[in-house]
Image (cartoon, coloured by chain):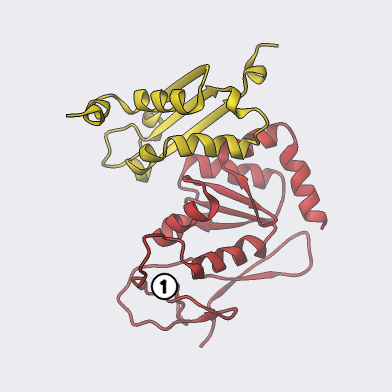
Chain colours: A red, B yellow
Amino acid sequence: MALTSVTIAVPSSSSAVVLPRIFSLRSTTLPLRTLSFAGTHHPFLVLRNSKSIARVPSIRCSSSALTPQLKDTLDKVVTSNKVVLFMKGTKDFPQCGFSNTVVQILKSLNVPFETINILENEMLRQGLKEYSSWPTFPQLYIEGEFFGGCDITIEAYQNGQLQELLEKAMCT
Amino acid sequence: MGSRGASVLLSRASRIKTKLQSTLEASIIEVEDVSHQHAGHAAVKGTQGETHFNVKIVSPKFQGQSLVKRHRMVYDALAEELQSGLHALSIIAKTPEEAAPK
């Protein structure tokens, strides 16, 4: 079964980063198969060999949205790219003013960054709030660490801290 | 109706103010409802406003805390509001020294 994946061109380096598009979910009632992602199984994040993906109701006992599998996945996502932004909408079509502000700031700094649209997946959205201990979006991660939301990003951009941190991240 | 019933009658802005004042010993609190600025927002549809707020808070408890930590303190104090329709907060969190006019 072919893996539907997206290749993100990273202008400042010569290698491309491949990030499986596991967060693009649409609800359909199609039959599903689980796909192993780097050794872990995600019964609620499934991928088909076409663009349509089915959503599985998760079978979990706890009321927490952050299952161990989701936590694992998030660990990998935030470290897969130097700069990761969980936002509402996409890089090209932000659907929230705060998310858009962060996107514009990052674009103006010319840093390569990955965005993930939390509007497409309610489980992801709630899980991330626990994962980051942060109740709102956007959420910016730099080098695997939670950096902040929109206010913090703006302040750090205005006082130069953001540029400094990103430069350091890009050089390592 | 106990005190909980009475507090629900207050606006969300008042409740935010009260909670932050008591939890964070704020010397200055300004709470502004800016939900109307986000009226076209998908999340605001079907609500009665009171979804987006600007909060400015000056408190000695922020001393020595990073911005992320300060914002988390504010979010923790408002956890109930966040679960009942409060959607976004723009937070300015300063210590009395930082807020003092230069």
Structural crowding at the residue carrying mark 1, measured as other residues with C-alpha within 10 Å and reported as few (<14), some (14–19) or many (≥20): some
Residue in the picture at 78% in, 59% down: A12
Residue in the picture at 45% in, 60% down: A124
Q: Quadrant of residue B99?
A: top right
**Farthest top residue?**
B101
Q: Which of B97 and A144 is in front in this view?
A: B97
Query: As displayed, is residue B11 above or below residue A102?
Result: above
Element carrying mark 1: loop
Residue B86 visible in rendering: no
Residue in the picture at 26% in, 41% down: B46
Residue B7, horizontal then vertical, whole percent = 27, 27
Count of labels in the image: 1
Q: Which of B68 and A148 is in front in this view?
A: B68
**Farthest front residue?**
B2
Residue in the picture at 61% in, 67% down: A76
Residue A106, horizontal then vertical, whole percent = 66, 46
In the displayed structure image, the side of residue B27 where residue A56 appears, left or right:
left
**Residue placed under numbered mark 1 in the picture:** A44
Residue B2, horizontal then vertical, whole percent = 21, 29
Query: As displayed, is residue A171 above or below residue B100?
Result: below
Query: As displayed, is residue A24 above or below residue B70?
Result: below
The residue marked by circle 1 belongs to what chain?
Answer: A
In the displayed structure image, the side of residue A58 where residue A8 appears, left or right:
right
Q: In which quarter of the image is the C terminus of chain A?
A: bottom right
Check disc 1 and give the amino acid type: Phe
Q: Which of A138 and B58 is in front in this view?
A: B58
Residue A80 visible in rendering: yes
